Image: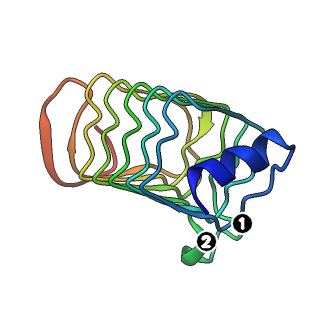
Amino acid sequence: MDAEEFIQLYNAGERDFRAMILQYADLSNVKLDSVNLSGACFYNVNFDSANLKNVNLSSTEWWDCNLFVEFWLCNLKDAIIDHCDLEGARFFDCDLRRFKTIGCNLTWTHFIRVNLQGADLGGYCEEPCEFWDVIRQDGVFIPGFNFTL
């Protein structure tokens, strides 16, 4: 699926995009509400200044690692993720500067080689987030694995 088809389907009322694969797409400034993106994979997608509200970005089955939402080399700079389920979501090599989560489920969310400078991770965790080789909110690089910033 490409970005144009995705937006056309969304504007037509479609809300179930489970296991969607989207790559090399520009979704900057997009506003999505109440969409199921569980198991989706995003590669080189620009979500700059996007606003996602009540979006399911978690696994459809907590035990199946193949169904976790993954963001690879994505730009989520200045994106707002509002009351979304990010349980088990994985962010690899993403730009998350000034990324903001509000009231999100961040249980077992993975942040691997990401830039969180200026980010505001608001929400709750039943189990901790995992961080590998990240740039913290204050700009300090933290090598290796951590459960906390």
Left or right: where 40 falls relative to 121? right
Q: Position of residue 6 (x, y in %)?
A: 67, 51
Q: Position of residue 137 (x, y in %)?
A: 27, 27
Residue sitting at 32 percent across and 47 percent down? 94
- Point out the image quarter for the C terminus: top left
- In this rendering, the answer to whether 144 lies above or below 31 is below
Q: Which mark is residue 34?
A: none
Res 114 seen here: yes
Secondary structure of residue under mark 2: helix
Secondary structure of residue under mark 1: loop
Res 35 seen here: no
Dot 2 or dot 1, earlier in sequence: 1
Residues 145 and 114: in front is 114
- In this rendering, the answer to whether 122 lies above or below 35 is above
For the residue carrying disc 1, how many other residues have a C-alpha within 10 Å: few (<14), some (14-19), or many (20+)?
A: many
Residue farthest to the right, as pictured? 13
Q: Which mark is residue 60?
A: 1
Residues 19 and 110: in front is 19
Residue ID for mark 2: 67
- In this rendering, the answer to whether 60 lies above or below 16 is below
Left or right: where 18 falls relative to 71? right
Left or right: where 147 falls relative to 105? left
Which quarter of the picture shows residue 2? bottom right
**Kind of residue indicated by mark 1:** Thr
| Count of number-bearing discs | 2
- Decide: marks 2, 1 in contact (CB < 8 A)? yes
Residues 11 and 131: in front is 11
Which quarter of the picture shows residue 68? bottom right
Left or right: where 85 falls relative to 25? right
**Kind of residue indicated by mark 2:** Leu
Residue sitting at 79 percent across and 39 percent down? 11
